[in-house]
Image (tube, rainbow, N blue to C red):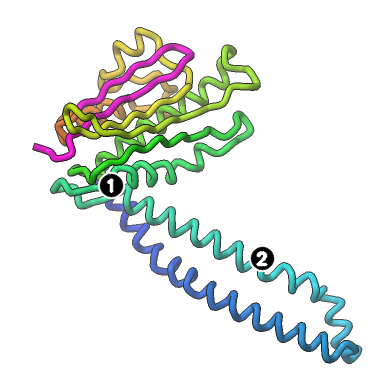
Amino acid sequence: MSALGELVAGIAHEINNPVNFILGNLGHASEYTQSFIDLLRLYQKYYPQPEEEIANKIDEIDIDYLICDFPEIISSMHKGTKRMTQMIHALRHFSRRDDTVAQPTDIHEGIDSTLLILQYRLKANPERPEIQVIKEYGTLPLVECFPGPLNQVFMNLFANGIDAIEESFVNSNFSVPEYQGKITVRTDINEQSSGVIIQIADNGIGMTEEVKQRLSEPMFTTKPVGKGTGLGLSISRQIIEEKHSGTIRFQSELEKGTEFWIEIPVVIN
């Protein structure tokens, strides 16, 4: 995980510079485009009858369409590049390598970065509609933690929730039009312990009693061969309990979903 985090952070850093260069120049390109369009409009106003060769070229390239469409292309490129910068920021935050010492961290930023990376799995596909994410964030202080490993826990729990929802769509009991896959994230402060609480719930297929009893076993997985290692929850428990002096527990009911409850202290003792 550490090596993978370093690789992701390195790639994100290398991509960041050229993307910022493109983003910065798109602003100038937009201004230049508008200047050329204004100039063309002036020519059309004061020289409404151009020479035959110019008139033929105007018809050939459909100048009115280009004038309307080219600014839209620049705008789309700007939006796409902004999206890339957001993803790069998310990757760099998710794969934080400075995890040798706990540091004050915005928990919500870590959750948001993880969800942004998983956006491709939340979108609608031919098998199911889009999975809705509901955020119910409380007011949290900065938390002394190891952000990289903690983000890995969020990634594992969100990915498992998405898997459970997708399994629901192939289960006959969920084959109803009104079923909407949902993942809910809640954060709050435990007034008694002064710890930070993070709840991640899905309305997916849920677990049987047998699965719940074995969930903490390393190498145990209900997923098909090649899709799951059975290490995700075991590693997550280790990160929360051993690295952050916290607790992680869950409750689940078959066909009603699963909820994980994480609590970590604001300051690690």
Q: Tell me how far mark 1 sits from mark 2, CA to CA.
A: 36 Å
Q: Position of residue 109 (x, y in %)?
A: 34, 47
In the image, farthest residue toward the front? 191
The range drawn in magenta is 247-269
Magenta-drawn stretch, dominant element (helix, strand or loop): strand
Between residue 53 and residue 242, name the one nearer to us. Answer: 242
Q: Mark 2 — residue?
A: 72
Question: The residue under label 1 is which amino acid type?
Answer: Asp
Does the magenta-highlighted stretch encompass residue 248? yes
Estimate the x, y position of residue 141 in percent, counting from the top left.
24, 44
Residue 146 rendering spot, x and y as whole percentages? 20, 43
Mark 1 is surrounded, within 10 Å at the Cα level, by few (under 14), some (14 to 19) or many (20 or more) other residues, namely some
Q: Quadrant of the C terminus?
A: top left
Residue occupying image coordinates x 43% and y 68%: 20
Q: Is residue 255 above or below residue 79?
A: above
List the residue tagged with mark 1.
106
Q: Secondary structure at mark 2?
A: helix
Q: Amino acid at mark 2?
A: Glu
Image check: 175 left or right of 158?
A: right
**Neighbours of disc 2 within 10 Å: few (<14), some (14-19), many (20+):** few
